[in-house]
């Protein structure tokens, strides 16, 4: 099957829409991360912490899923034809995957709002923040390559 120029344009538009959605979810997720962090010490105002933490975990998983099943999957599935994008994704994805694992472990610990040890939550939230910051930096590099 030969490709028409239109289908290439449509693929780029689809990628642009996914990137836009990813950036919007990331912005919301990061804002909720800071809402959770502002609730320290975590042994007070448990109701607000539970609600904010639940919203944060859900949005974080949505954000991670959009990146993984949207943008990264599209690149590695063979749909992406630009070699510079493929090479960038191959170089960046292992570190993105490490950050994803940390986020998934955090979600596993706190999606059910297990708040039995506030010190552990503070430590895990800090570790997650570092991983998310690294992931954002790597995603931005990939997005920059996609937009060229």
Image: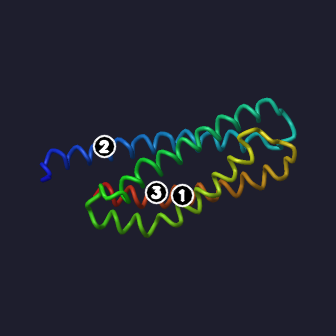
Which one is nearer the viewer's eye here, 53 or 90?
90
* Image disc number at residue 27: none
Q: Position of residue 10 (x, y in %)?
A: 23, 43
Location of mark 1 (residue) = 135
Measured in 3D between alpha carbons, the distance from the residue under mark 1 to the one under mark 2, in whole angstroms, is 22 Å
Q: Earlier in the sequence, mark 1 or mark 2?
A: 2
Q: Secondary structure at mark 3?
A: helix
* Residue 145, quarter of the rendered image: bottom left
| Left or right of 2 in this view: 83 | right
* Residue 130, quarter of the rendered image: bottom right
Question: Dot 3, how many residues are within 10 Å of its Cα: few (below 14), some (14-19), or many (20+)?
Answer: many
Q: What residue do we see at 71% from left, 38% from top?
A: 53
Which one is nearer the viewer's eye here, 109 or 122?
109
Location of mark 2 (residue) = 14
Measured in 3D between alpha carbons, the distance from the residue under mark 3 to the one under mark 2, in whole angstroms, is 17 Å
| Left or right of 139 in this view: 45 | right
Q: Earlier in the sequence, mark 3 or mark 2?
A: 2
Q: Is residue 44 above or below residue 101?
A: above
Q: Quadrant of the C terminus?
A: bottom left
> Nearer the observer, disc 3 or disc 2?
2
Q: Is residue 94 above or below residue 8?
A: below
Q: What residue do we see at 72% from left, 31% from top?
A: 51
Location of mark 3 (residue) = 139
Q: What residue do we see at 29% from left, 57% from top?
A: 80
Measured in 3D between alpha carbons, the distance from the residue under mark 3 to the one under mark 1, in whole angstroms, is 6 Å
- Asked if labels 1 and 3 touch by Cβ distance under 8 angstroms, the answer is yes
- Asked if labels 2 and 3 touch by Cβ distance under 8 angstroms, the answer is no
Q: Secondary structure at mark 2?
A: helix
């Amino acid at each position: 099957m030969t490709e028409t120029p239109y289908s290439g344009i449509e693929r780029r538009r689809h990628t642009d829409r996914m990137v836009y959605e990813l950036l919007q979810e990331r912005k919301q997720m990061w804002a909720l991360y800071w809402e959770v962090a502002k609730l320290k010490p975590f042994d007070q105002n448990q109701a607000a912490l539970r609600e904010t933490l639940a919203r944060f975990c859900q949005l974080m998983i949505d954000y991670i899923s959009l990146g993984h099943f949207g943008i990264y999957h599209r690149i590695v599935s063979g749909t992406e034809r630009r070699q510079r994008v493929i090479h960038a994704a191959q170089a960046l994805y292992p570190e993105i995957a490490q950050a994803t694992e940390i986020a998934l472990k955090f979600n596993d610990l706190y999606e059910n709002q297990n708040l039995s040890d506030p010190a552990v939550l503070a430590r895990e939230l800090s570790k997650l923040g570092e991983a998310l910051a690294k992931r954002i930096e790597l995603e931005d590099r990939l997005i920059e390559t996609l937009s060229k």
